[in-house]
Structure formats: structure tokens, C-alpha cells
Image (cartoon, helix red, strand yellow):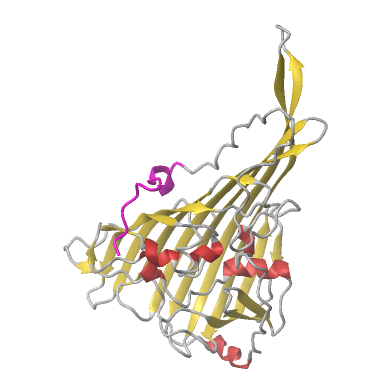
Amino acid sequence: MMKTLFHPTLLPLITLCMAMTTRPAAGDTTGAKYQPQLDPVFTAGETFTYRATVEYRDLLRVTDSTKKKQKDANGDTRLVPENKVRDSTQSHYWAELIADAALARTIFKNGSLQDAEFLVRHCELIDDKGNTMQLLRAGTIIGARKQADGQVAFAIDGKAPNAELAARLSVLITLGDEHTRASDLIGAPGPVAVGTTWAVNEKAMLKSDLPRIFPGVDRVAGSMTLRSAQPNGTGAGQTTVTGTYRLGDVHPPFPADVEANSSDVRFEIVVTAPITPGPGKYDVQSSVLIHHTGHTGNIQIGLTETDIEAGFTIDQEAQYVVGGTVASAAGLATAPLVPELPPLAPGMSSAPVLRPKGSLFHPLQQGVEADTTAPTPANSSPTIRQAAPPPLQVPADSPFSKAQDLPTAPANSK
């Protein structure tokens, strides 16, 4: 399966359904304990190399079920559904960015990446028909800055990109959370031995950028495990951490007249990082599966109910090689400033690719929950609700095939 990228702070927020092609090594058997590092440690003026890949797939299906009155063999009148798919679209693309990078003007005291510039070596996209296109030419300078409203602003050689390019970049380059880091969200509560499992930090997640991206989320359940530790005798080496978790009560971004079920949002993550904080290679692989369903009713010639299903899977991989000197990053010193962009419309996610596309959908407004009752016409027969569409399938070799459902996952450890 192709992979995709996320910044490590949002990685634990927006990713994970990927069947891992490489299993971690057996690891240290000495009984030693380790505090897994999950965040690249950035300092002012830092340069680093950066590689991100992303595979994005979405599905939108709208089915009209018209109930027509028909008489059966006994002469009794029944409502018989007649299903018709009104809209069924899928899209799929794979993108990659390889760049030399340097911190620009601002990082926060917790080391979270908030403002950086990327000198493109390679940036291309392959669509679902196999067509390859160059997103950005080599030598292009990308400026990325986290804004106060949570939006990531991009500049391409000093100019704001169009909406489509910005959406592609939003999954190739995502910046950190001012208030928290991946270690706060999914890190171990202290030094642990290989094989130890701990709960994700639900409280920290609910105070992070997560509710901004997934409106309505009120529960997070899941766990992480230290899979391996490979010390090299000098105090350095690598650890690998894996985990899965789910979100509870996420509101789908459907129109207000849709009676919507809570979305199914599931994550999977693999982080390989240095044993001790500092320079080194950080590799974060993640995947997110999002499944929305909803129903709405309309009166036409007969009684018609519409079933709406939207699904997304996003697989990502981000690699940071921090420390040392990146020769080509010298050109970043002359990069123009990232322009300030106007805030997003109220309720719009800073990750636009996570929202269904098409005329049926609009941003979910902050503080406004979707209607929980479909309109019922006066003096009409009651609507016969059809079964919801089947959920998106989880691969048999994915950790989600054995994931615990809410709320029976391990209690929060922090």
C-alpha cells in the first residue's frame, strides 16, 4: 500500500489504516527501560531534510430510495422501496515531496514546528488514472506558517497558491500544535520496557487541535506499545512505537437537514525515532479511516429518502533527518515571507481534504449540531428507514481488525 505524510503532532490526530509492510525488529531483551521519543527536536536556525508521501482515497455515494405503494397477492397495499444511486464518485491520488528545509521565524518553546521553509528537490502527484504531474518544480521555495486560527498558510515563491494546490500541500506539510506535542498525546507515561502497552492521553487530545479537525469528538480510546529498542552501545539507537485508537461522537460534515450517525474515525501509527532527544532520523507512518453516514427525507411524487455515505482513507509517511548542515538550504535565507491569509469560514476544518465534496455538502458550523430529525410531511405515511450502507472494510492484516471498540479500550493513563 502506498503511504502518506503528516507532521508528528497531527499525525496522531489524523491518520492510520495502513497495513505495515515492514515489521519492527525483535528489540532489546535486556530488560532495560526507555522513554520513546516521538517528536523531532527543533531549535532556532535548524536545517533538516524532509520527505513526505501521501495516498488519499475518498468515496461519496448518494442513494435515493423512493417508496411506492404496491398491492401484493392478497390485495394489501405495501410501501416498496426502489433504490437509485444518484451520485457515486471516488478519487484517488498519491503525492510525494522531497525537500531541504530550514526553520523560518517562529517556533514555540515546546519545540513544535510552526513556521518553516522548504526548498523543493522533487514534488509530484500521480492520479487514479496513472497520470504523473509535477506539483512543484525543483528549486521552488514553499513557505508554511501555522496561523492563530489553526489554518496553515502556504506561499509558493512568495505567492499564495490556488485552493487545489493548498489542499495537496495540507497533507504533505502539516505543522504542529502550539500547546502540545505527539509525546504528550501518545507518549509513554515514563520509561518502559520493550513490549509495554499504555493508553493514549485522552485529556491531552481533547485539548489539542483534534476537536478543530473533528467537530464533536468527546472520547478517544486506544493504546500504544513499545515494539522494539535497538541501542548501539553509545547511548544512541532507535525505538519503534506502534498503536491504534478511535474517536467517539464525531459529527459528520453533512448539511443541517441530514439525520447523521456519528462518524467512524480510526487511527493507526508507527513511529521510529532516536532513543535520546536530539539529532537523528524520525520516521512517522500513519493512516486514518473516516466513514460518514446520514439520511434525509424529501417529498417528491412519492415518499423518497436519501442515504448519504462518505468515506476517506489517508495513508501518510513523514521523515525528518534533523541535525547537520543542508547545503542547499542556504537558498532559503532569501525566501520571501509567507503572506497572512484570512481565517477560514466558521467551522471549516484546516484539513480541507477531510470534508466531503459536492453540492450536497457545506462546512459544519461551530457550535451548531446537525438536525437529529428528518422533516416529516403532514398527513403522510411514516418513513420506512433503510439499513445504513455497509461500513468501509478494514484490511485483515490491519491492527484495526482486532481494535477495541469504544468505550472498552484501556483507561487513560495520564
Residue placed most toward the observer, 198 or 277: 198
Q: Above or below — where is 15 with respect to 318?
A: above
Q: Residue at x 55, y 43 (%)?
A: 392
Please tell me in which quadrant of the rendered image residue 66 appears.
top right
Q: Can see residue 17?
A: no
Task: Judge whether residue 405 is colored magenta.
Answer: yes
Say left or right for 328 vs 242.
right
Say left or right for 158 vs 12.
right
Which region shows up in magenta?
Answer: 396-414
Task: Judge whether residue 262 is colored magenta.
Answer: no
Residue placed most toward the observer, 229 or 207: 207
Q: Position of residue 235 (x, y in %)?
A: 24, 77
Q: Above or below — where is 254 with respect to 297?
A: below
Give the quarter of the figure containing the C terminus.
bottom left
Q: Position of residue 123 (x, y in %)?
A: 63, 70
Q: Position of residue 202 (x, y in %)?
A: 38, 61
Say left or right for 180 vs 166.
left
Q: Residue at x 76, y 53 (%)?
A: 359
